Image: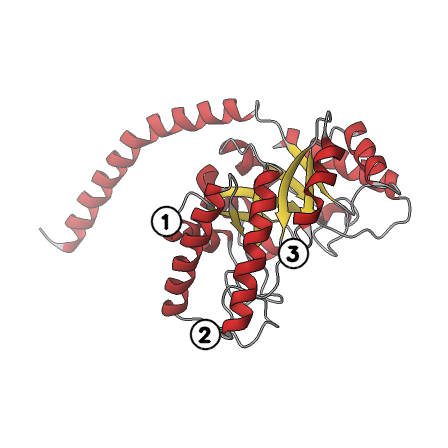
């Protein structure tokens, strides 16, 4: 058989195989898409998002908007467990993720800095478990954290080993460790959601997960592809902000389109939180935050 005949025959065979696999795949996709319409969005606020002079006032405002997640900073969290538990008692709001708050970093070359990370991170994990949090967010290393282990395969293997131990500890405490990929301006290491999910997989612990952040996802070629790459198994949290200046969703106009990413979340049956991590350009916080929540819900329906 000459090359032209071979290619022609191969093309025909490939087309037949594709056609044979397309129908069940299409049926499955249609079925998944139909089911996706039933997936509800769980919106979460960080502590500084809602207006209010006191924690109670902030939580009242959140409940008035149907916001059911509360993302806390991890710094000093162990000393706030009772305060937060009492504040949320009888409310529809639950603690979502804990945003960092530890000292040191996991890829530190300096043993003392690494030990500081180990100690403070575990303290936060224990408190997170007591509060029923979905997990503690961490970044392996920011650009300014030096001296840092080099970006090599040995470092990746080391990171996976360290995360395995940390993930098992988190699992024992009823929570997880959540890896957050950042844009290249903030971190050289782990910039894509798929990278974070792959590291979580290779850490080989149910206590290690990944997240996506619509601000940092400007590194991605596709919001949909990025979030699908983690899937329901690894995607544990999502951050959201305006896509031009990291303000409230909607403050950057047409740039603030999350439909593609929301479609992925609905297709995988994502049941964790989409949490506001952003500043605000305007002065009327109550109105701007309300408009942002309305925009998110509208685009969720469009997805």
- Left or right, 288 with respect to 17, comes to right
Q: Can residue 20 be seen in the rendering of this structure?
A: yes
Image depth: mark 2 or mark 1 in front? 1
Residue picked out by circle 2: 150
Q: Secondary structure at mark 3?
A: loop
Horizontal side, residue 54 vs residue 242: left or right: right
- Look at the picture and state if 109 lies above or below 96: below
Residue drawn at point x = 42 percent, y = 43 percent: 206
Residue situated furthest right in the rendering: 283
Does any portion of residue 139 appear in the rendered image? no
Please tell me whether mark 2 sits on a helix, a strand or a loop. loop
Residue sitting at x 62%, y 67%: 185
Q: Which of the two marks, 3 or 2, is nearer to us in this view?
A: 3
Name the one closer to the observer, 129 or 217: 129
Q: Which mark is residue 101?
A: 3
The CA distance from mark 3 to mark 2 is 24 Å
Question: Which residue in the protein does label 1 denote?
Answer: 204
N-terminal of the pair, mark 3 or mark 1, is 3
Q: Residues within 10 Å of mark 2 (few under 14, many from 20)?
A: few
Q: Position of residue 172 (x, y in %)?
A: 46, 42
Density class for disc 1 (Cα within 10 Å; few <14, some 14-19, many ≥20) is some
Q: Where does the image place residue 191, in percent across and percent down from the top left?
A: 53, 60
């Amino acid at each position: 058989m000459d090359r032209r005949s071979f290619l022609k025959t191969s093309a025909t065979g490939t087309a037949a195989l594709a056609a044979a696999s397309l129908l069940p795949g299409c049926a499955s996709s249609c079925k998944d898409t139909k089911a996706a319409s039933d997936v509800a969005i769980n919106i979460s606020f960080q502590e500084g998002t809602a207006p209010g002079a006191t924690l109670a006032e902030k939580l009242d405002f959140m409940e008035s908007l149907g916001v059911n997640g509360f993302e806390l900073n991890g710094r000093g969290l162990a000393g706030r467990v009772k305060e937060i538990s009492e504040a949320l008692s009888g409310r529809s709001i639950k603690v979502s993720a804990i945003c960092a708050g530890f000292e040191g970093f996991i890829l530190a070359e300096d043993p003392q800095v690494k030990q500081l990370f180990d100690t403070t991170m575990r303290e936060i994990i224990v408190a997170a478990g007591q509060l029923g949090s979905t997990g503690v967010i961490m970044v392996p290393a920011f650009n300014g954290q030096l001296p840092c282990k080099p970006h090599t395969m040995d470092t990746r293997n080391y990171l996976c080993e360290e995360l395995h131990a940390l993930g098992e500890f988190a699992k024992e405490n009823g929570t997880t460790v959540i890896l957050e990929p950042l844009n290249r301006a903030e971190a050289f290491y782990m910039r894509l959601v798929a990278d974070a999910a792959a590291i979580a997989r290779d850490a080989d612990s149910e206590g290690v997960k990944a997240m996506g952040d619509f601000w940092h996802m400007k590194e991605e070629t596709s919001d949909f592809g990025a979030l699908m790459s983690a899937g329901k198994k690894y995607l544990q949290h999502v951050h959201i902000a305006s896509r031009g200046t990291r303000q409230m969703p909607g403050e950057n106009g047409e740039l603030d389109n999350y439909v593609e990413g929301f479609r992925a979340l609905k297709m995988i049956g994502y049941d964790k939180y989409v949490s506001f991590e952003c500043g605000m350009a305007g002065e009327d916080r109550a109105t701007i935050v309300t408009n942002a929540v309305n925009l998110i819900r509208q685009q969720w329906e469009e997805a």
